[in-house]
Structures are given as C-alpha cells and as structure tokens.
C-alpha cells in the first residue's frame, strides 16, 4: 500500500490517534513556532490541519497535502478562515513560481515524504531569498540506545503510516541547499527538533 493510501485510510481517526501527544507536546511546539508568522506562508504537508488554528489572521497561509483524506479534515478546520487556502499537491513537484513565500513550514512531514531532499529543494525553490524554513520534525537520535530503539520500530511505523523514524533530517535540510539558523532539541534528547533554516548563499542556484 502506498503512503498516500495509508494516509487516506487513517485520516478519519488520525487526530484521535495522536490526541495525547498533541495535548502534552505537539500543541505547544506548534503555537510557539507559528503564532508570530506573517506574510505568505506555505505549509507543506498540512495533514488534518492541526497547525491552522495557530497561524495569525495577518498571515496568508497556503497548505498543501498529497492525501485527499487528510485535506478533507483540514478543510473542516479552516472553514471561515479567509486567509487559508488548501490545495492537493505533491511536495516533490509543487506548482508554485520561484521565490513566492516568506516562510515554508513543515511539521512531522520530512519523515514520510518519499524523497525528502527532492521535496526540500522544491521548498527552497519557492522560498524567497530572504525567507525562512521552519520545521518541527523527529529523526534518528545521536544517542545509541535511542537510535537502536528507533531502528527496531522503524519497519512497524513505516508499515502502518509510512513513517521513517531513522532519517537524518538535519543533514537532508543541508543537502537541499539550506543553512541551519537554529537547531533546538524539543523532547527525547534530540529525537524531536525545531529547525529554522535559510538559503545557503554558498549553494549555487
């Protein structure tokens, strides 16, 4: 089963599945990262729209997702929000012009995109030269015991929801031509991180 098919299948219960961790961890991370954004914002992988309530009214937010099931739930959450546009689109092949957005946001997306570096290069392409990538992601830990545990559960996570928990996401962001401005550990040592990045001026366009 493809990743898209998995997300379409679980979209109806996805919020319920992650409700405890959303309440105790994810929600506060989302609010801290997103509540002050302004200008044109692209959210790549909008899921069921759990970020949407944290964007200020002054931000013009475009959210994309490859799963129609997830987008349906996000549309329910965005009703009445004139500053939010939701589109069915592949992160690896986005239909936006170069240099369009002031911010590109990902939350728990770079673990499930089939080709994360390709998707990140697309994000860099549509991000203004003065813009910023904001990512809240989980990844392989540098702690040996945690890394072993992640390796053990990775096949299970991938089979259920197409989630790779052992990716070198910080490295992938750099490989796509970004320069890391902030790398903040959020939980479980360095498994969950907030990353802020901008165009690497030394990377050829």
Image (cartoon, helix red, strand yellow):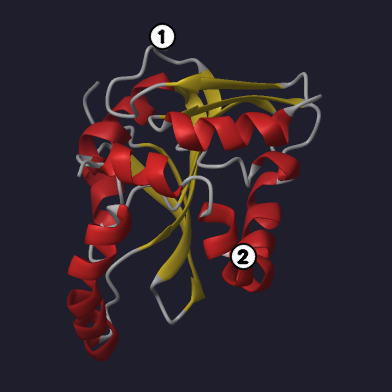
Q: Nearer the viewer, mark 2 or mark 1?
A: 2
Residue at image position (59%, 60%) is: 16
Q: Is residue 197 visible?
A: yes
- Image quarter in which the C terminus is found: top left
Residue occupying image coordinates x 45% and y 15%: 99
Which of the two labelled residues, at mark 2 and mark 1, occupies the earlier sequence position?
2
Kind of element beneath mark 1? loop
| Residue ranking furthest to the top | 97
Task: Where is residue 159? Give x, y as percent.
Answer: 22, 59
Is residue 92 found left or right of 46 in the rendered image?
Answer: left
Q: Which mark is residue 19?
A: 2
The residue where tag 1 is placed is: 97
Quarter where residue 151 is shown? bottom left
Q: Can residue 183 be seen here?
A: no
Q: Residues within 10 Å of mark 1 (few under 14, many from 20)?
A: few
Task: Tell me if residue 123 comes above or below residue 147 in the rendering.
Answer: above
Q: Judge by depth and name the residue closer to the eye, 169 or 74.
A: 74
CB atoms at circles 2 and 1 under 8 Å apart? no
Quarter location, residue 67: top left
**Tag 2's secondary structure?**
helix
Residue 46, position as x, y percentages in the image: 52, 37
Determine whether 130 is above or below 50 in the image: above
Q: Residue at x 43, y 81 (%)?
A: 189
Question: Which quadrant does the N terminus fall into?
Answer: top left
């Amino acid at each position: 089963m493809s990743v898209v098919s998995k997300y379409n299948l679980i979209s109806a219960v996805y919020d319920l599945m992650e409700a405890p961790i959303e309440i105790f961890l994810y929600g506060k991370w989302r609010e801290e990262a997103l509540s002050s954004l302004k200008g044109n914002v692209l959210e790549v992988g909008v899921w069921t729209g759990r970020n949407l309530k944290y964007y200020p009214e002054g931000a013009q937010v475009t959210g994309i997702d490859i799963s129609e099931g997830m987008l349906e739930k996000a549309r329910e959450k965005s009703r009445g929000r004139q500053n939010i546009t939701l589109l069915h689109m592949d992160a690896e092949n986005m239909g936006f012009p170069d240099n369009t957005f002031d911010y590109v946001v990902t939350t728990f997306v770079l673990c499930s995109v089939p080709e994360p570096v390709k998707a990140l290069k697309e994000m860099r392409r549509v991000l203004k030269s003065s813009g910023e990538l904001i990512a809240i992601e989980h990844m392989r830990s540098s702690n040996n015991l945690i890394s072993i545990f992640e390796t053990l559960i990775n096949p299970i996570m991938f089979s259920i929801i197409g989630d790779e928990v052992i990716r070198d996401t910080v490295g992938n962001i750099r490989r796509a031509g970004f320069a890391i401005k902030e790398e903040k550990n959020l939980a479980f040592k360095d498994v969950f991180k907030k990353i802020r990045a901008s165009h690497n001026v030394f990377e050829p366009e």
